[in-house]
């Protein structure tokens, strides 16, 4: 049985999609991608030829399946109770999907992913974990990712302070590129193991490499079944059959996304069965960071409450990821189809077929990039936030504090920063959202501790904005979103409105200057604030509209005030 079934319901765009598939065939795009022809995307090979290792990684990594199995058995034998993965973006999203979909497996340790510099999030794990029974996976392609290395410094020091100092390394595994800074740290601090990933695979295309599969193996996922699914999809994505019913699924999905984006349907809305809903977060990074550049982009919309057709504009394309046997969202999707919206239905037969889904979306993204005439493998605007964050940290180091900011409004415990658009909080939000034009969207950037309570409040705020103003909304926790949608925010056509949410940190945690050091020049609260300020300045420099609501100490209450109709 195929790993998935893909059906296109084009609405009024059938002719456009058929023409797109003809263009693929006439330009020999699929064969050229498989021959690693960089000219599919750009006339020069820069950041393309050295980023195509994902095409053949499935076959290569089969050889490591036994190594994964031995490592998993060794970890089980050591009676580890927990695994904490420290990473950001491409190094953390796929492991999070595996944990969410497969759950806690009998006899294996549980795994959590920490991809936040919020001190509350850091201390939550420090409070609950037993260092003697915890394994840490440190994952970063470059080996220098600020957030990941800061978390490594904190938790290695934390472990060594509670166990025998020379045994702390036994609790750490590194996944990185050969020759990276992290590879050197793993040797210096005697990590239990290190995995050198293929350097020609970009982070967001790395789900089927060591970055995704080592953590999956450690929690008991059958890696060979994942790879079998991926291999089957890879074979299908080599075909030159472009029929929308049974043809090359990567070519068809990529043609739909690319051609519809060029026609103004550039808001990719993911609807998924509850059991695989988390897959949308991985797709979000892949699509946003790959396509959001050169004034173009496909905006992924995930975790949005489903609404009736009337709340959606004419800029949406829907993809329904359905797990066989889960039909709770079938009727709502059928209503969207009947209203004339373009919908792609993808049926997934088994949770192990996520391997095929990872490869399908990677191929579709490469194909969509051809239609958009962009390089889907680079991220030219990401550095802007990093540079400005560094400047903020530099100012803090000199003065011992950040530059003063004066709110334009303060009421009910919430302070507002930005242009003085109104003399009330409700008026500020309405006036800010009223600046949106055709094809606009709202990105909520929450520099807050991720919790279920905050998730629910953000979901309600998104629903209210969509239903009242007819605007597409996205939401991401900072600084996680910087490694996911941050490229698109600054590289697309500039129609986004950006709402930053910040709050008081009731607790803080130091970031050691060096692993094992008691000296700490900055804390996680300082780093998080610098990142929020740095990205806000990067957005303003790119001509984007930004407003910040500082929620004080009542985070959920402050968000509810923004969502209130009163």
Image (spheres, grey):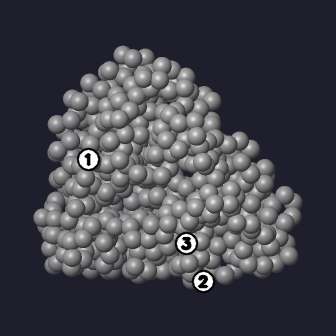
Between disc 2 and disc 3, the foreground one is: 3
Q: State how far apart marks 2 and 3 are (Cα).
A: 21 Å
In which quarter of the view is residue 421 placed? bottom right
Residue pointed to by mark 3: 538
**157 above or below 80?**
below
The percent coordinates of residue 169 (x first, y second) are 40, 28
Q: Residue at x 74, y 68 (%)?
A: 405
Secondary structure under the numbered disc 3 in the rendered image: helix
Mark 2, residue position: 437
Q: Nearer the viewer, residue 405 or 476?
A: 405
Real-space CA distance between mark 1 and mark 3, rounded to the nearest whole angstrom: 31 Å
Q: Position of residue 170 (x, y in %)?
A: 39, 25
Badge 2 or badge 3: first in the primary sequence: 2
Q: Residue at x 69, y 71 (%)?
A: 547
Return the residue nearer the eye: 236 or 181.
Answer: 181
Residue 311 appears left or right of 89: right
Circle 2 packing at 10 Å, graded few (<14), some (14-19), many (20+), is: few
The C terminus is located in which quarter?
A: bottom right
Q: Secondary structure at mark 2?
A: loop
Residue 500 position (above or below residue 198): below
Q: Under tag 1, what secondary structure?
A: loop
Q: Position of residue 534 (x, y in %)?
A: 58, 65
């Amino acid at each position: 049985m195929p790993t998935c079934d893909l059906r296109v319901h084009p609405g009024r765009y059938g002719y456009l999609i058929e023409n797109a598939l003809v263009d693929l065939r006439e330009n020999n795009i699929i064969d050229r991608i498989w021959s690693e022809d960089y000219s599919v995307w750009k006339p020069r090979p820069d950041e393309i030829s050295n980023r195509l290792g994902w095409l053949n990684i499935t076959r290569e990594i089969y050889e490591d399946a036994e190594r994964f199995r031995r490592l998993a058995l060794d970890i089980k034998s050591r009676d580890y109770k927990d695994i904490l993965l420290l990473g950001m973006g491409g190094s953390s999203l796929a492991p999070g999907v595996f944990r969410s979909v497969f759950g806690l497996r009998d006899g294996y340790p549980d795994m959590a992913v920490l991809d936040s510099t919020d001190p509350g999030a850091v201390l939550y794990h420090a409070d609950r974990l037993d260092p003697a029974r915890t394994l840490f996976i440190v994952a970063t392609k470059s080996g220098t990712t600020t957030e990941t290395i800061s978390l490594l410094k904190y938790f290695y020091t934390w472990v060594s302070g509670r166990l025998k100092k020379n045994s702390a390394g036994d609790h750490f595994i590194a996944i990185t590129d050969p020759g990276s800074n992290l590879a050197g740290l793993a040797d210096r601090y005697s990590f239990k193991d290190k995995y050198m990933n293929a350097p020609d695979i970009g982070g967001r295309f790395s789900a089927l490499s060591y970055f995704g599969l080592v953590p999956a193996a450690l929690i008991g996922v059958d890696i060979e079944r994942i790879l079998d699914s991926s291999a089957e999809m890879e074979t299908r994505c080599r075909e030159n059959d472009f029929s929308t019913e049974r043809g090359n699924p990567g070519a068809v999905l990529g043609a739909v996304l690319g051609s519809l984006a060029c026609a103004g349907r550039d808001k990719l809305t993911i609807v998924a069965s509850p059991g695989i809903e988390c897959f949308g977060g991985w797709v979000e990074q892949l699509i946003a960071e790959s396509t959001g550049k050169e004034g173009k982009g496909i905006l992924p919309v995930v975790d949005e409450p489903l609404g009736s057709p009337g709340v959606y504009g004419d800029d949406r394309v829907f993809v329904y990821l359905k797990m066989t046997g889960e039909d709770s969202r079938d009727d709502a999707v059928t209503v969207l189809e009947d209203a004339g919206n373009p919908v792609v239905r993808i049926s997934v037969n088994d949770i192990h077929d996520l391997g095929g889904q990872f490869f399908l979306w990677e191929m579709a993204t490469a194909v969509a990039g051809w239609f958009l005439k962009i390089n889907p493998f680079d991220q030219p605007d990401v550095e802007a936030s990093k540079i400005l964050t560094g400047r903020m940290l530099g100012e803090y180091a000199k003065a011992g504090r950040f530059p003063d900011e004066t709110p334009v409004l303060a009421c009910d415990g919430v302070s507002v920063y930005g242009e003085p658009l109104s003399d009330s909080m409700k008026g500020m939000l309405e006036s800010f959202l009223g600046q949106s034009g055709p094809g606009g969207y709202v990105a909520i950037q929450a520099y807050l501790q991720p919790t279920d309570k905050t998730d629910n409040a953000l979901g309600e705020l998104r629903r209210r904005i969509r239903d009242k103003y007819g605007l597409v909304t996205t939401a991401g926790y900072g600084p996680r979103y910087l490694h996911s949608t941050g490229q698109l925010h600054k590289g697309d056509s500039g129609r986004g409105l950006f709402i930053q949410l910040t709050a008081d940190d009731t607790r803080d945690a130091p970031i050691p200057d060096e692993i094992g050091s008691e000296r700490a020049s900055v804390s996680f609260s300082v780093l998080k604030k610098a990142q929020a300020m740095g990205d806000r300045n990067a957005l303003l420099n790119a001509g984007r509209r930004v407003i910040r609501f500082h929620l004080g100490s009542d985070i959920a209450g402050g968000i509810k005030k923004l969502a209130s109709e009163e």
